Image: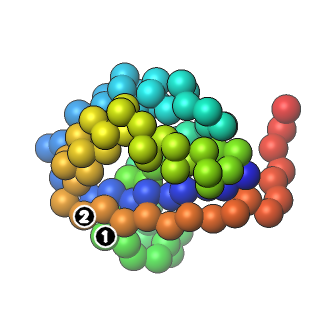
Amino acid sequence: MILLQIYFDIAPAEADAFQEMYVTQYAPALQKQQGYQRSRLLRLFPAQVATEIEAAPTEFTYQMELEFDSEENRRRWVNSPEHGVLWPLASGMARTVAWRGYDVTATDERA
């Protein structure tokens, strides 16, 4: 299993539209893909909470996590017609975008 973490710096004025795009377009398109396991959209804690917990500083306000059964199937998603439409939409809403890929080596989840 692999995990791709995509980091977005979304302006406050775009936040609602970005979240809506993920829920109504991005996630449904992912769910149709071969090998897709799950995704999540995470929003950074407010500045006050981040300070209280001594969080590391970051320029990013959102993180999208995508899990696939293999890197091969994730790349199929990247080459799909849906991704060709949705990635420019998602990345176009951001001031900055970056990503990292990981092999999942262990999990601990409740059923």
Q: Position of residue 8 (x, y in %)?
A: 33, 57
Instruction: Quadrant for residue 101, please give it.
Output: bottom right
Secondary structure state at the residue bearing disc 1 = loop
Q: Nearer the viewer, residue 102 or 49?
A: 102
Q: Residue at x 23, y 40 (%)?
A: 89
Q: Which amino acid lies under the numbered mark 2 shown in the image of this protein? A: Thr
Q: Nearer the viewer, mark 2 or mark 1?
A: 2
Task: Mark 2: give few (<14), some (14-19) or many (20+) Cα within 10 Å.
Answer: some
Instruction: Please report whichever mark, 2 or 1, sits nearer to the chain's N-terminal start.
Output: 1
Q: CA distance from mark 2 to mark 1?
A: 8 Å
Q: Is residue 8 visible?
A: yes
48 to the left or right of 13: right
Secondary structure state at the residue bearing disc 2 = strand
Q: Is residue 15 visible?
A: no
Q: Which residue is mark 2?
A: 96
**Placement of 110 over or under 20, stated as above or below:** below
**Placement of 21 over or under 105, stated as above or below:** above
Q: Nearer the viewer, residue 4 or 77?
A: 77
Q: Which amino acid lies under the numbered mark 1 shown in the image of this protein? A: Glu
Task: Mark 1: give few (<14), some (14-19) or many (20+) Cα within 10 Å.
Answer: few
Q: Residue at x 14, y 44 (%)?
A: 13
Q: Residue at x 31, y 70 (%)?
A: 59
Q: Quadrant of the C terminus?
A: top right
Q: Which residue is mark 1?
A: 59
Instruction: Quadrant for residue 94, please give it.
Output: bottom left
Label count reads 2
- Asked whether disc 2 touches disc 1, contact meaning CB atoms under 8 Å apart, the reply is yes
Q: Position of residue 41 (x, y in %)?
A: 46, 43
